[in-house]
Amino acid sequence: MPVHALDSFYLSITLLVTVAFQLSGFAIAYTFQFDKITDLTGGSNFFILALFTLLAGETYHARNIVASVLVMCWAVRIAGFLFFRVLKTGHDGRFDKIRNNFFQFLGFWIAQILWVWIVSLPVIILNSPAISDVQHGGSNPAFGTSRDIAGIVLWALGFVIEATADAQKYRYKSSKTTPKDRPISSGLWAWSRHPPYFGEMMCWLGIWILCLSPTTNGSVSSSARAAQYGAIVSPIFTFIVLMFGSGVPYSAKPQAKRFYLMAYGPDAGQEGPLVWENYKEYLRRTSILIPLPPVVYKRLPGIVKTLLLDFSMYRFDEVRDGRLAIEEAAS
């Protein structure tokens, strides 16, 4: 029978596990000013929660196993890749301005606690006693419905897109022969400016759909069913974080700033203006998130591009942002 711990949805125990794990990582990272475990701690936390709830819930039906394994596979891939990347680069530039500030650095780890726990909710609730008790009392719930298949296919496509895009970007940045005066525009990156984010969104939407599928031939309580539907906060939160938090905003304008300085900064050469024109052409033909053929996206009117999430907040203003960038580079 499932282990009952604090509440029947495993919300409290998984939050406590996440807080303990992340604060342990913060203590190490802040004490030793050590960047290399930040993303490793975040990614591996997903693995811990999926495995812990599966074992504690003791409901080894196909859906529980598949959903938990898919989460663990995603966690191993993202944690392993990010850990490998930071080992190669030597440090994480995101923390250069906050690494020595206790409260600002702690703020990142608190945000990571929320990210891990909220995004893991579909599999936490699926494996919890609120669902497991009903499953133990009834027959083995059917698995392989059209909804199950849709969830698995979405996850698989997202996983392949995210992993492939990360590998393509890493090879591009690591190569000594690729031009550094223009952004990557090959492979998946020719169709989207942020394909790993799109893949990650697909992964967690697929996990929620899979975990929402009917879990028994009988019925679950109304509160349990509401919790399963409520776990849609997982893909929604993923979308919000990537589109308005540490995802696109963190990369869009800083990337534009880098190419603007190549064109007009103190060290710009005679070919500088061409660098900026090439970058603007790249923006015109490349979708910000949803992969689309460049020949199609380039011809779309501005209002359609906005509907496809290319918001003005991501755009580099040549007058205002450009002036600030040049002043900062010159100081």
Image (spheres, rainbow, N blue to C red):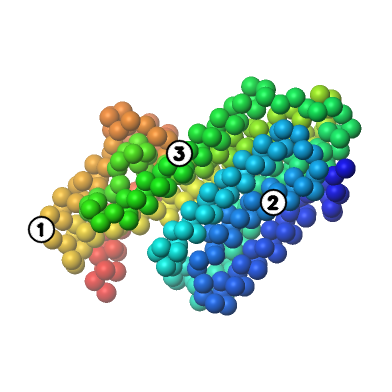
Foreground of the two, 192 or 28: 28
Tell me where residue 23 sits by quadrant.
bottom right
Does residue 192 appear left or right of residue 132 in this picture? left
The quarter of the rendered structure image containing the C terminus is: bottom left
Farthest top residue? 146
Residue 93 location in percent, x, y? Answer: 42, 65
Q: Distance between the residues labelled 1 and 2?
A: 54 Å
Q: Which residue is drawn at 66% across and 38% down?
A: 67
Q: Do the residues labelled 3 and 1 touch (CB within 8 Å)?
A: no
- In the picture of the structure, the residue carrying the numbered disc 2 is 49
Q: Is residue 194 visible?
A: no
- In the picture of the structure, the residue carrying the numbered disc 3 is 161
Hey, what amino acid is under mark 2?
Answer: Leu
- Rate crowding at label 1 as few (under 14), some (14 to 19) or many (20 or more) other CA atoms within 10 Å: few
Does residue 157 appear left or right of residue 183 in this picture? right
- In the picture of the structure, the residue carrying the numbered disc 1 is 270
Residue 65 location in percent, x, y? Answer: 70, 38
Tell me where residue 149 sits by quadrant.
top right
Residue 80: numbered disc: none
Q: How far apart are marks 3 and 2 (CA)?
A: 24 Å
Foreground of the two, 29 or 77: 77
Tell me where residue 142 sits by quadrant.
top right
Question: SS of the residue at dot 3?
Answer: helix
Q: Which residue is drawn at 42% across and 42% down?
A: 164
